[in-house]
Amino acid sequence: MSSASSVAVGEQPLTRVKARSPWLETLRRISLYTVVRVIFLFITVVISVYLTILIANMGGYVDKMQEGEIAERVAMRIMADPVMRQLPVEKRNQIMEEMVQVERKRLGLDTPFFVRSLLYLRNALTLNLGHSQKMTSDSGSRQVRLILLERLPSTLVLFATSNLLLFFMSVFIALMLSRTYGSFFDRLIIALSPTSAAPGWFYGIFLILIFAGLLGILPFGGMVDAPPPPTPLEYALSLLKHLILPVSALLISTGAVSIYNWRTFFLIYSSEDYVEMAKAKGLPSRMIERRYILRPTMPTIVTSFALTLLNLWGGAIILETVFNWPGLGRLYYQAIGLVDTPVIVAETVIYAYLLAITVFMLDFVYALIDPRVKVGEGAKQ
């Protein structure tokens, strides 16, 4: 008896170890997956940002353009100085060359482009966005961080309103159409879906011509009236009035095809065998939609919603330009036109970080909303 009890007592720690091993294995799997995923996403961000630096600098050709601009500015400065004009040509050229070299050294153009591209990469990855040489913010600052922060609220107002409205409207209308397959409104959405072939700015031009040019009931563009209204209420009403045309252009451009895509997606899940079995059992239609249609589609809905929020950062280059909207898209357009590398790289690196974080978090969100998904075991399934 004593020997049996001693064996039982001796086996207790082993039993506890076995009971804990699944949790330890899960923790080990998730930790390994997290480390590998973070490293992979970081490498992807590094490659994309470095390619952006190379493209924005045109492989170093922008440096030659900048050196030409430096020589031109120095020459104009010397010729505008009466004392300099009286000097001999050789002396004047020597002074001009010295001033050009000082300016080149100040801007770092005296180092090879490959070395400076790596410095650009380090500063971009650490969000040391630096200063813009060709743009200033409304407050007069040349810091890229302040330039972006001043344009960000305008883009968020426009695209948060339009994209979130489009997303929720598309999902709910598509769910309604999936219940009434073949109805008049269902056929109408199918007929209107080709209208999304044209971009939002295309419809925006016609809306401006009709409602601003011909009827004169809405503004041509901008974010608020000029001068801006003095009171918060008048400012909000002016902002809403200026939002009507760009938001309408985006909804007209992508509304029908978005509803059509979601409607088709819900119809596919509605025809599954388990849905037919639930209908045969006499379950209410609302319960069937909630449990057997919406629940399996939640990962796709969450992914679409996350990418919708992510797209708020970039804005729309042509649409914001057409409506003269002071957002990040228009800023990006101006930076490309001026070959302003710091602004171009800053917008790209922030978007790359946001995209990497979104992709990383979605893996864990999938595991929370869908019990079939296990983090780190995608290859085994």
Image (cartoon, rainbow, N blue to C red):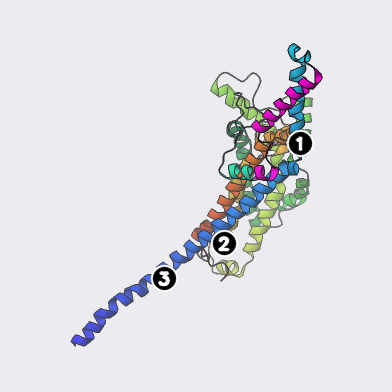
Q: Which residue bears the numbered disc 1?
A: 64
Q: Give the range drawn in magenta.
A: 88-117
Residue depicted at x 59% and y 55%:
41
User: Which of pointers 1 and 2 lies earlier in the amino acid sequence?
Assistant: 1
Quadrant housing the N terminus: bottom left
Q: Which residue bears the numbered disc 3?
A: 22
Q: Position of residue 108 (x, y in %)?
A: 66, 35
| Magenta: main secondary structure | helix
Q: Where is residue 217 in the image (x, y as percent from the top left)?
A: 72, 25
Mark 2 or mark 3, whichever is nearer to me: 3
Give the Cα separation between the discs numbered 1 and 3: 61 Å
Q: Is residue 368 magenta?
A: no
Mark 1 or mark 3, whichever is nearer to me: 1
User: Which of pointers 1 and 3 lies earlier in the amino acid sequence?
Assistant: 3
Q: Is mark 3 on a helix, strand or loop?
A: helix
Q: Which residue bears the numbered disc 2?
A: 296
**Label 2 packing within 10 angstroms: few (<14), some (14-19), many (20+):** some
User: Which of pointers 2 and 3 lies earlier in the amino acid sequence?
Assistant: 3
Confirm or deny contact between disc 1 and disc 3 (CB under 8 A): no
Residue depicted at x 58% and y 53%:
42
**Label 1 packing within 10 angstroms: few (<14), some (14-19), many (20+):** few
Q: Quadrant of residue 228?
A: top right
Asked if residue 5 lies left or right of residue 33, the reply is left
Q: Is mark 1 on a helix, strand or loop?
A: helix
Q: What element carries label 2?
A: helix
Quadrant housing the C terminus: bottom right
Mark 2: which amino acid? Answer: Pro
Residue 59 vs 273, above or below: the answer is above
